Image: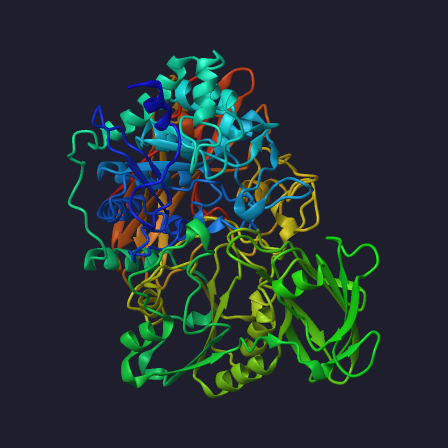
């Protein structure tokens, strides 16, 4: 190839199938095909409808890597049907805090679980002749930040201060497994910096660890707009810039010609792309794997199975579930959008589904004509009406509007007038020649109750009530304005001072009065069972600003469970949320984003056609502050742990993330990691670890136990094995997940579960000595969750080993 041809293979360009994310052009001679790149990970985003599978957080909740492998193969087949060579998935960012907008794309908070899921998905995609792209390498655990750091539409360029031990023990693990065992063909660096250096030009990450230590022979491709240099990026390990050629086009060519970059470096960059294509058969014109297909019955059935296995029964007081068809004549299904699920947060997270089975359709299909489903939408959102507003100055109704040329409402207004409502268009703002607006006056409540109040704005927006901030939005992105909600208790006839501020247009102030809650209560009172479908309003480009459910949904749940003791709460959320009434709601199901077949999966679980078997891949805390030992708050405020101070997030917690932190600091979770109830019961017995003394390096131990289904329904249980280092010389978590196995059992059936524990089950990363197994006592803990330990046994290590490689800890069950 000529230098021009080589450089053309290092950056995105026009071309490829319409509707995909990006394209790397081919070279005519030699005959090298281009590479089309499509977004994932819950499906293949091709610009035409495809199968929308449940999100990764839901697949992680299955604790079933073989099912994730089937999903990966199915998505790859659909990607091939659209002429795509590169799937921009899987996402393997650890779940560190629940406010991360892309939490639903993670495999949860535990590195072992995430690694098992990641390598299963990756190897499956690669086996079907599609390049899997591991993202976002590394520590992309938030999509927004503080200070003046750029964080537009999920491209948060904040700095992460994190130790090598935390990176090695937690954040690297899914990536390493997907590279060394999953055979990934591509890796995408994160937008953020690691200890002051952008991930996309971080030599330690991309060259020292990824390429040299792990032996990765594929290509490193930037996230869209995530390249920041030419010479540093090329020399330090970035191979392809996407989606354009700002740094790797003519600038890279000139850098070679000027001697700033060796042409051999460009040769390596190009070779890596060719190697990845060769490994899937693209250079030979014979792609690996089966024939391309899209939207088959098999894929739909798989999507439904994942939704069923990924649904977690968080609580089931007095065995309210499953519902008895003969005892239920009417179900009241209520919520802001009871006839449809929240399916994604938008952006690259969204899949245009071939079909969607909504909750009502699913219930009708399973329950039939004998059960009536009455739906009540509690979303009655509208602009705050003029008659309830009084301007701070002037006469009549409305609010006083002041227009400023500044972006922050400073200086003297260039125009002041009374406006009926807060309903600003971009054109109005431009015609006045202003950049920000402030509305002031009073609000008189038309009725008593909990209102949902929302500010929608393209730029920063604020709502103050009686001088206190209630809603604070950072604004939207190129997909349009963002709406930020809060709840507000009002008393009929009372007057409240309000101030609304917005920079840029459009902007509006709306509310959701409590009339929807009253209608939901009326429906719940007359029904046999009340079902509340609660949803987050998470937006792709901005982390959640509150741990609570948005708007007045929390008040809705409280009112409905008071009206009907037989209340089931459905959490259609990508992450844990605040559950202040959890003790009073008898049954709770965590649905996550359940994919296109979610309605049928939900109905099957509600009526007992399927026994729930999902387990929580994350810990549910009572409060946001429970998640980190250091200071944590919600945006737009700053805090050291999250979301950071002046654009820097400090991972002072080290390896104590998720249940490791909750255990270490004796924080009681609402629902622990690995938790999930069933419609049947399982008994654990006879744990034996052999040998009892580990006295050889790389010696594998075996842990065996028996699990029996003691209930009257067929069900599946995920047996979890944790290890506790009793005599550690460094701070280690009280327990760490090292193996798990999902076992399906008929009533009365017993299975023997066997786990093999390699050195990796006992080691930690020492900053001087590397991976280390110390002498001393270790405890092997087996249970149904991280807080429900059923059996214990011990082992003594008397021959330490350092600087070894990590290995698998697989499990298997024998009937």
Residue 720 sits above or below residue 733 on the image = below
Look at the image and tell me whether residue 215 can be seen.
no
Residue 412, given in percent of the width and then of the height, sits at 84, 58
Residue 343, given in percent of the width and then of the height, sits at 41, 60
Q: What is the quadrant of residue 420 in the picture?
A: bottom right
Indicate how the structure is coloured in the image. Answer: rainbow
Identity of the residue drawn at 73% across and 84% down? 492
Q: Nearer the viewer, residue 630 or 742?
A: 630
Is 535 displayed left or right of 310 in the figure?
A: right
Residue 111 sits above or below residue 633 on the image = above
Residue 530 sits above or below residue 186 on the image = below
Identity of the residue drawn at 49% across and 33% down? 138
Q: Nearer the viewer, residue 509 or 811?
A: 509
Look at the image and tell me whether residue 579 can be seen.
yes
Residue 688, given in percent of the width and then of the height, sits at 36, 36
Residue 172, given in percent of the width and then of the height, sits at 46, 31
Quadrant placement of the N terminus: top left
How many circles with numbers are drawn on the protein?
0
Q: What is the quadrant of residue 647 in the picture?
A: top right
Is 6 displayed left or right of 582 in the figure?
A: left
Is 48 displayed left or right of 621 in the figure?
A: left
Identity of the residue drawn at 22% across and 24% down? 29
Is 287 displayed left or right of 249 in the figure?
A: left
Q: Nearer the viewer, residue 697 or 186?
A: 186
């Amino acid at each position: 190839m000529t230098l021009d041809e080589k450089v053309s293979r290092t950056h995105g360009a026009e071309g490829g199938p319409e509707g995909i994310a990006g394209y790397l052009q081919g070279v005519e001679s030699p005959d090298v095909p281009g590479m089309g790149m499509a977004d994932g990970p819950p499906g293949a985003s091709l610009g035409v409808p495809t199968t929308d599978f449940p999100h990764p957080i839901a697949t992680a909740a299955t604790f079933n890597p073989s099912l994730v492998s089937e999903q990966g193969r199915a998505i790859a087949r659909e990607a091939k049907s659209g002429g795509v060579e590169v799937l921009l998935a899987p996402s393997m960012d650890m779940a560190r805090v629940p406010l991360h907008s892309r939490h639903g794309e993670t495999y949860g908070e535990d590195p072992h679980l995430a690694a098992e899921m990641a390598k299963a998905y990756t190897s499956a995609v690669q086996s079907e002749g599609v390049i899997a792209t591991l993202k976002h390498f590394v520590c992309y655990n938030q999509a927004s930040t503080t200070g003046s750091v750029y964080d537009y539409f999920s491209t948060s360029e904040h700095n992460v201060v994190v130790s090598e031990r935390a990176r090695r023990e937690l954040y690297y693990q899914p990536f390493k497994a997907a590279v060394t065992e999953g055979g990934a063909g591509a890796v995408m660096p994160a937008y953020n910096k690691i200890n002051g250096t952008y991930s996309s030009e971080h030599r330690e990450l991309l060259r020292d660890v990824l390429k040299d230590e792990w032996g990765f022979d594929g290509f490193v491709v930037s996230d869209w707009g995530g390249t920041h240099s030419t010479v540093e990026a090329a020399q330090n390990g970035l191979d392809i810039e996407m989606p354009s050629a700002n740094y790797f086009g003519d600038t890279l060519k000139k850098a070679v010609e000027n001697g700033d970059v060796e042409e051999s470096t460009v040769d390596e960059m190009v070779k890596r792309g060719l190697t990845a294509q060769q490994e899937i058969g693209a250079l030979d014109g014979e792609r690996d794997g089966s024939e391309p297909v899209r939207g088959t019955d098999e894929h739909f059935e798989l999507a439904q199975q994942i939704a069923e296995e990924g649904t977690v029964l968080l609580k089931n007081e007095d065995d309210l579930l499953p519902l008895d068809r003969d005892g239920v004549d009417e179900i009241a299904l209520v919520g802001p959008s009871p006839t449809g699920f929240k399916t994604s947060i938008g952006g690259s997270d969204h899949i245009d589904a071939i079909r969607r089975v909504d909750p009502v359709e699913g219930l009708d299909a399973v329950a039939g004509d004998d059960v009536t489903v009455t739906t009540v939408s509690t979303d009655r959102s509208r602009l705050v009406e003029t008659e309830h507003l009084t301007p701070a100055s002037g006469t009549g109704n409305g609010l006083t509007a002041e227009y400023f040329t500044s972006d922050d409402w400073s200086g003297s207004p260039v125009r002041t007038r009374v406006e009926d409502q807060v309903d600003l268009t971009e054109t109005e703002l431009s015609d006045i020649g202003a950049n920000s607006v402030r509305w002031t006056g009073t609000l008189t409540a038309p009725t008593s109750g909990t209102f949902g109040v929302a500010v929608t704005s393209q730029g920063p927006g604020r709502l103050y009530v009686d001088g206190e901030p209630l809603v604070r939005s950072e604004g939207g992105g190129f997909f349009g304005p963002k709406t930020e909600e809060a709840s507000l208790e009002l008393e009929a006839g009372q007057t409240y001072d309000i101030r609304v501020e917005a920079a840029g247009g459009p902007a509006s102030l709306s509310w959701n009065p409590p009339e929807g809650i009253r209608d939901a209560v009326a429906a719940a009172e007359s029904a046999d069972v009340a079902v509340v479908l609660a949803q987050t309003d998470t937006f792709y480009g901005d982390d959640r600003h509150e741990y609570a459910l948005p708007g007045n949904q929390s008040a809705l749940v409280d009112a409905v469970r008071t009206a009907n003791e037989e209340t089931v709460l459905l959490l259609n959320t990508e992450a844990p949320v605040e559950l202040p009434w959890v003790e009073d709601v008898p049954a709770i199901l965590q649905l996550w984003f359940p994919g296109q077949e979610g309605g049928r999966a939900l109905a099957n679980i509600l009526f007992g056609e399927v026994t729930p078997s999902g387990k929580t891949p994350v810990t549910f805390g009572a409060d946001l502050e429970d998640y980190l030992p250091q200071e944590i708050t919600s945006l737009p405020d700053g805090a050291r742990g999250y979301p950071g101070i002046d654009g820097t997030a400090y991972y002072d917690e080290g390896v104590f993330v998720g249940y490791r932190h909750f255990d270490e600091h004796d924080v009681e979770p609402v629902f622990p990691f690995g938790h999930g109830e069933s419609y049947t019961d399982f008994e654990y017995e006879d744990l034996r670890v052999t040998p009892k003394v580990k006295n050889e390096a790389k010696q594998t131990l075996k842990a065996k136990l028996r699990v029996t289904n003691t209930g009257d329904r067929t069900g599946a249980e995920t047996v979890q094995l944790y290890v506790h280092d009793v005599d550690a010389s460094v701070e280690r978590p009280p327990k760490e997940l090292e193996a798990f196995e999902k076992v399906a059992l008929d009533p009365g059936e017993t299975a023997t579960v066997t786990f093999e524990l390699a050195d990796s089950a006992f080691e930690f990363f020492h900053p001087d000595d590397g991976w280390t197994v110390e002498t001393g006592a270790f405890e092997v803990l087996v249970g149904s969750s991280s807080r429900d330990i059923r059996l214990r046994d011990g082992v003594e290590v008397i021959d330490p080993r350092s600087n070894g490689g990590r290995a698998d800890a697989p499990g298997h069950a024998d009937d």
